[in-house]
Image (cartoon, grey):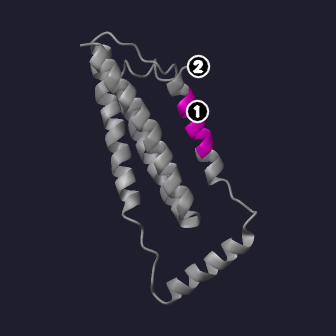
Amino acid sequence: MNRIATTVAAAAILSLLMSAPAFAGEDTVVVTAAATAAQMRLGKALARPKLLPALYASYAALQAYDVVSTKQGLARGAQEANPLMQGVVGNNGAFLAMKAVAVVGTIVAAERLWKTNKAAAIMVMVASNGVAAVVAARNARTLRQLR
């Protein structure tokens, strides 16, 4: 298995593990839930940090770059390194649809997670951005080598 596939698999497993409920700190959860309920009763809704929308935007941009750089690389004779994507990258519609589903699905998952575990929502987006950045860097390196 190549490094990219290993990294993607590790990020997926990490994302799943981070979204699982943790029962070790039940007291903390109760205190946090009580504080949240008290804030909402006072009319102070929890504000979403500016970091989260920025992570959404950067993830979408990295996925868009992946599409563009992958298409450029394929046009110059490169081959798709991810065996799961090899059958998809040749079809523009399927490739764009798959990337759109990845972006929307990740953002929706982070938004749902935000409601119950804010730190995990941010970590999912950081991990997703990290994986996408590794893929983008590899694509950029491949394009430089193909010149």
Nearer the observer, 30 or 87? 30
Residue 80 spot, x, y in % from top left: 42, 17
Q: Residue at x 45, y 84 (%)?
A: 44
The correct choice, above or below, for 16 with respect to 46 in the image is: above
The correct choice, above or below, for 51 with respect to 39 in the image is: above
Horizontal side of 58 relative to 18 (left or right) equals left
Callout 2: 10 Å neighbours few (<14), some, many (20+)?
few
Label 2, secondary structure: give it.
Answer: loop
Farthest residue, direction top: 77
Amino acid under disc 1: Ala
Residue 11 in the magenta stretch? The answer is yes
Q: Residue at x 39, y 25 (%)?
A: 138
For the stretch drawn in magenta, the main secondary structure is helix
Horizontal side of 130 relative to 31 (left or right) equals left
Q: Are marks 2 and 1 in contact (CB under 8 Å)?
A: yes
Residue under label 2, please give it.
Answer: 1
Nearer the observer, 80 or 93? 80
Amino acid under disc 2: Met
Label 1, secondary structure: give it.
Answer: helix
Residue 9 in the magenta stretch? The answer is yes
Q: Residue at x 43, y 22 (%)?
A: 88
Horizontal side of 114 relative to 75 (left or right) equals right
Magenta range: 6-14
Which of the 4 image quadrants contains residue 6? top right
- Please give the label number shown on residue 9: 1
Horizontal side of 33 relative to 87 (left or right) equals right
Q: Quadrant of the N terminus?
A: top right
Q: Residue at x 30, y 26 (%)?
A: 69
Which of the 4 image quadrants contains residue 78? top left
Residue 135 spot, x, y in % from top left: 42, 30
Q: Quadrant of the C terminus?
A: top left
Earlier-in-chain disc, 2 versus 1: 2
